[in-house]
Image (cartoon, grey):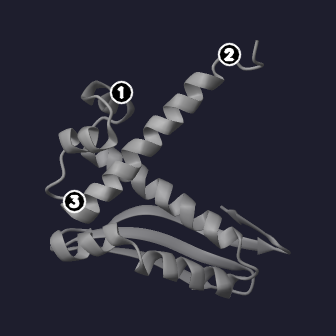
Amino acid sequence: MPLNKYAPQVATHRRTQNAILEATKQLIATTGLKKMSMIEIADVSEVSRATLYNHYRDKDSVIRALCESEMQRLVEIAQLAPDATSALEQISIEISGDKALAAMRIQDNYSSTISCTSRSNYLNCESLICANASPCHLVMHGRLHFRQTSLYLS
């Protein structure tokens, strides 16, 4: 008997969430954020609509989860960097090569901004998504601290 009897369910839940978020990112890159629907997200992620709605209430909640997941991915990339300047460079490379962000700028007239300022021992970052003629939405704000060789988000 496993130590945690719910471990298989947790693993399945994470795999399903990852499939949904990857499908969402793929759809943003190919069809754009505005044209994408929950039905398409379910189809591309190969989950039922009921499963999708069990995980996320609506398209906005999927997008919010995707933004949080992507910010966490960028934090993990920054954690591998030896200093704040290298972390900023790696984050910049990842963002500039992201097809979903490029599609949002071109197809949906959205701009996404991840602003990071480098200090001696930390990066202060915030992520914004802005639609043309609409207010920007703060997706995430945090500070990446460097302490010797470790990095954490506060």
SS at mark 2?
A: loop
Residue 48 vs residue 56, the one in the foreground: 48
Which SS class for mark 3?
loop
Camera-side mark, 2 or 1: 2
Q: Which residue is mark 3?
A: 33
Toward which corner of the image does residue 109 lie, by quadrant? bottom left
- Are the residues flagged by discs 2 and 3 in contact, CB closer than 8 Å? no
Residue at 42% from the left image edge and 58% from the top image edge = 67
Residue under pointer 2: 5
* Vertical order, 24 against 145 (above or below): above
Q: Are marks 1 and 3 in contact (CB under 8 Å)?
A: no
Q: Quadrant of the C terminus?
A: bottom right
Disc 1/disc 3 C-alpha distance (Å):
21 Å
Quadrant in the rendering for residue 44: top left
Q: Residue at x 16, y 71 (%)?
A: 107
Q: Nearer the viewer, residue 50 or 47?
A: 47
Mark 2 vs mark 3: give the one in front: 2
Three-letter amino acid code of the residue under disc 1: Asn
Q: Can you identify the residue that label 1 sits on? A: 54
Q: What separation in Å lies between label 2 and label 3 (alpha carbons)?
A: 38 Å
Say what amino acid the circle numbered 3 marks: Leu
Report the front residue among 90 and 127: 90
Say above or below: 50 vs 66.
above
Q: Residues within 10 Å of mark 1 (few under 14, many from 20)?
A: few
Residue 37 place in picture, x, y as percent: 18, 46
